[in-house]
Amino acid sequence: MFSVGYKTQIFFARIQKNLVISGIKLFQMLKYKEIYDLVEEKIKQIEYHSGPPELYDPVKYVLSLGGKRLRPCLAIMANNLFNDKMDDIVYPAIGIEIFHNFTLLHDDIMDKAPLRRNSSTVHIKWNENVAILSGDAMLIMAYDLITKTNQKSQFEIFNIFTKTAREVCEGQQFDMNFENRQDVTLDQYIEMIRLKTASLIAASLAIGAVAGDAAKAEIELLYNFGMNIGIAFQLQDDYLDVYADYSKFGKSVGGDILSNKNTYLLVSALQSGSKKLVDELRYWLEIEKYEPTDKIKAVTKIYDKLNAGNRTIQLAMDYFTKGIEYLRQVNVEEERKVLLRSIISDTMKREK
C-alpha cells in the first residue's frame, strides 16, 4: 500500500549508524517529532487503488487534514519499549490512524458537523453517500494494514483490533442513545467514553507491545495504562470545552453546552444538584430559542455552584494517576519509558 521512502531510509540508516558508533540505544535517539514525521511520511506514501476518484479522493482529503497522530505514535513508542526495530509496527500504526479517521468521518455524518480541523467535512464537501462509502473504504484499508507485521504477531494484533473496532461502534451507539436522555448515570457515561474513546488508545499501545514481542503481562499493563489515560483525556476534554482559555484552546468554548451534549459535567450536575439547580439546568436543556452566550453563561454558573468542573478534572487526574501506575509496572528499563511518560503528561497539560 506504500513503500519505504528515501527520507525513511536515511532516518533508519542514521539511527543504525549511531547505534554502532556510540552504542546509544534507540530509545535515546528516537524523539517524538521523528516518530510523528515518520507517521506523516507513511501516510503521504499510501498507494491508492486505481478505482473511482470519488471513492478515494475523500480519503486522501481526510488524511491530509493532519491531526495529533497520537494513536500511531503511541503504538510505535510502545513497540520501542521492547524492540529497537520499527519494521513490524509501522504498517499497523498507520492502519490504526486510518481507522481513527474513519470513525471521525462517520461521526461527522451522524452529528451533521460542517467542519473538521477547520475544514469542510466530507459529507459537506461531497455528499453523505460519498462520505459513507469512503469511510467504508478507510475501514477496509485499516484492516489491510493492521496485519502487515511479522507472522508471529498477526493473529493477536488482528484480534485486538477487531475487538476494539467493535467496542468503538458500541461506544458511539451509546453516545447516540444518550443524546435525548437526562437520566444517564455517571457509570454509564464512563463506560461510554471507555468504549468510544479510550479503547482505541489502549489498543494502540497493546498492538505496539505485541509487535515488539512483549510478554503477555506487559501487553496487559500497557493496555490498562492506555485505557485509563484515554478516559482521563476525554474527561479533560469535557472540562476544557467549558473552562478553557479561548485564546489557547483554539476553538470556541461551550459547544457541548449549546448542543446539550452529555458530558461528565452535565451528568454529574443532573445527579448531584439540588432540585432548584436541576430544574434550572433542565430549563436550559429544553429551551429552543436563546442567545448562545446567555446559555453558556447560565449553565457554566450552575456548574460552578456544583463544583462540577473541579470534580471532573480531579477524576481525570485520578484516572491519569492510575494509568501512570500501570506504566510504572511495565518491566523494562525506566529510561525506555521516559518519552512515553513525557508525551502523556504533556497531553494532560494541553489547553487545546
Image: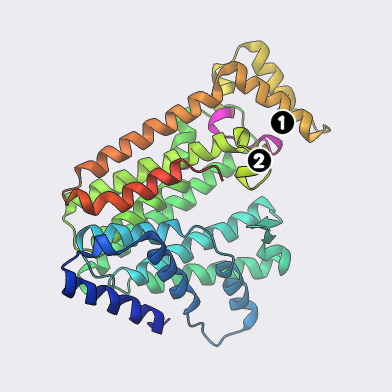
Asked if residue 222 is positioned above or below residue 22 in the image, the reply reads above
Q: On the image, numbered disc 1 is attached to which residue? A: 296
Near mark 2 (Cα within 10 A), the count class, few <14, some 14-19 or many ≥20, is some
Q: Which residues are magenta?
A: 257-265
Looking at the rendered structure, which numbered label has been put on residue 98?
Answer: none
Mark 1 and mark 2 in contact (Cβ < 8 Å)?
no
The x and y percentages for residue 81 are 23, 57
Residue drawn at point x = 72 percent, y = 24 percent: 298
The residue lying toward the viewer, choosing from 315 and 244, is 244
Asked if residue 247 is positioned above or below residue 204 in the image, the reply reads above
Residue drawn at point x = 68 percent, y = 43 percent: 252
Looking at the rendered structure, which numbered label has been put on residue 246?
Answer: 2
Amino acid type of disc 1? Ile
Asked if residue 2 is positioned above or below residue 89 in the image, the reply reads below
Residue positioned most to the front: 22
Q: From where the camera sits, is residue 262 visible?
A: yes
The residue lying toward the viewer, choosing from 263 and 300, is 300
Residue drawn at point x = 58 percent, y = 22 percent: 269
* Left or right of 19 on screen, residue 189: right
The x and y percentages for residue 23 are 15, 68
Amino acid type of disc 2? Tyr
Q: From where the camera sits, is residue 5 visible?
A: no
Asked which secondary structure carries label 1, the reply is helix
Residue positioned most to the bottom: 50
The residue lying toward the viewer, choosing from 345 and 19, is 19
